[in-house]
Image (spheres, helix red, strand yellow):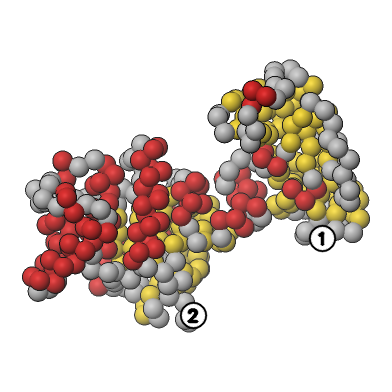
Amino acid sequence: MSNDFLVFDHVTKRFGALTAVNDVSFSVNKGEFFSLLGPSGCGKTTLLRMLGGFEKPDSGRIFLEGKDITDLAPNERRVHTVFQNYALFPTMTIWDNIAFSLRLAKLPKKEIEEKVDAILAMIQMSEHAWKYPNQLSGGQKQRVAIARALVDRPKVLLLDEPLAALDLKLRQHMLLELDTIHDQVGITFMYVTHDQGEAMSLSDRIAVINRGTIEQLDGPAKIYEAPSSRFVASFIGDTNFFSGEIVATEGDYCTIRPEGFPDIRAYNDKQLKVGQKVDLSVRPEKIRVTLAPPPPEKGASINVYSSTVQDIVYQGVYTKYWIKSSDLRIAALKPHSRFLLDQEPITWNDKVFVWWHPDDGYMVEAKQ
């Protein structure tokens, strides 16, 4: 048995003929902000519910601080859950909602007052203590739900899509608040979401889940820049895929011959050989779009292709282009780091050059 703080050891959960979680093993560090990320139905919420005690694995065990908690009731685990719908008691004030679990534990009145007042101050809700839930905004209700779950200091806080009911601007604000709360309390957070932006913004590490298994478990930057599979590359952000065969190798680089596209030079981090099949992922922000050809590069030759602009979407901080190059449609992003109106604009049907450095593509899998 590992000495890790929280361990899932070969956990499987079935619902009839459906295997929701399939032989999953991973560990979480104490104090970590850990996210389970994946599409609807991938098994992430089932993992969270098994940790919370609301579902029992068909096989495998769950350990917390070295103790097997698989068969313990939810109230015996010191693991609390914040639900998407807040689950606040509508007939209780905010102060009483937060004090509820402390009163159940029969703590002294003075200790309850100190704990509730302290956490209200931490979430900046002291002036709302005697209001009722229906008098609060969605963001305020979410803060109260988090405070209620944290007030008696659980070992793990589970957050199941906690921001899904909020509008975009409020979600962005709550992301910062969640990060601040985590830093202040130092408790392990396990966060379930299908929103890649939320997971990338908050997490120390992310487990990307697909069809009941973990496809990749890494830090946000590693998952984005070095995805382990085609699924991870496509689920985390936008990307362009070039599928083909390696036709040449030279030192640390190789040449890929895709279908319907000219040869591409790429960094051969997987040390693949001539004749092997590969999928190359190139993120849109790695691709440059210019009216003139790029300047000569020293060292490894850059990839340059003549193309035609098909579609343009201006989004303030950047413009997204869809470009026809040979038989493929490529997405590219151009950030607006300079004042846009001072530049010669690229417009529909323009003949342009798209180009990127061989180091900026990543081979996500080899298919034999």
> Which quadrant of the view contains residue 181?
bottom left
Q: Say what amino acid the circle numbered 2 marks.
A: Ser
Residue 233 position in % (x across, y down): 63, 48
**Is residue 88 found left or right of 182 in the rendered image?**
left
Tag 2, which secondary structure? Answer: loop
Q: Which residue is mark 1?
A: 271
**Is residue 186 found left or right of 1 in the rendered image?**
left
> Which quadrant of the view contains residue 156?
bottom left
Q: Is residue 14 above or below residue 337?
A: below
* Residue at 64% from the left image edge and 23% from the top image edge: 341
| Along the viewing direction, whichever of 75 and 57 lies nearer the viewer | 75
Q: Which residue is mark 2?
A: 2
Instruction: Determine contact: label 2, label 1, CB under 8 Å.
Output: no
Q: Looking at the image, is mark 2 or mark 1 earlier in the sequence?
A: 2
Q: Say what amino acid the circle numbered 1 marks.
A: Gln
* Residue at 89% from the left image edge and 59% from the top image edge: 251
* Residue at 70% from the left image edge and 52% from the top image edge: 364
Q: Is residue 228 above or below residue 346?
A: below
Residue 345 position in % (x across, y down): 70, 22
Residue 114 visible at all = yes
Q: How many labels sit on residues?
A: 2
Mark 2, other Cα within 10 Å: few <14 / some 14–19 / many ≥20: few
Q: Residue furthest top?
A: 349
Residue 244 position in % (x across, y down): 80, 44
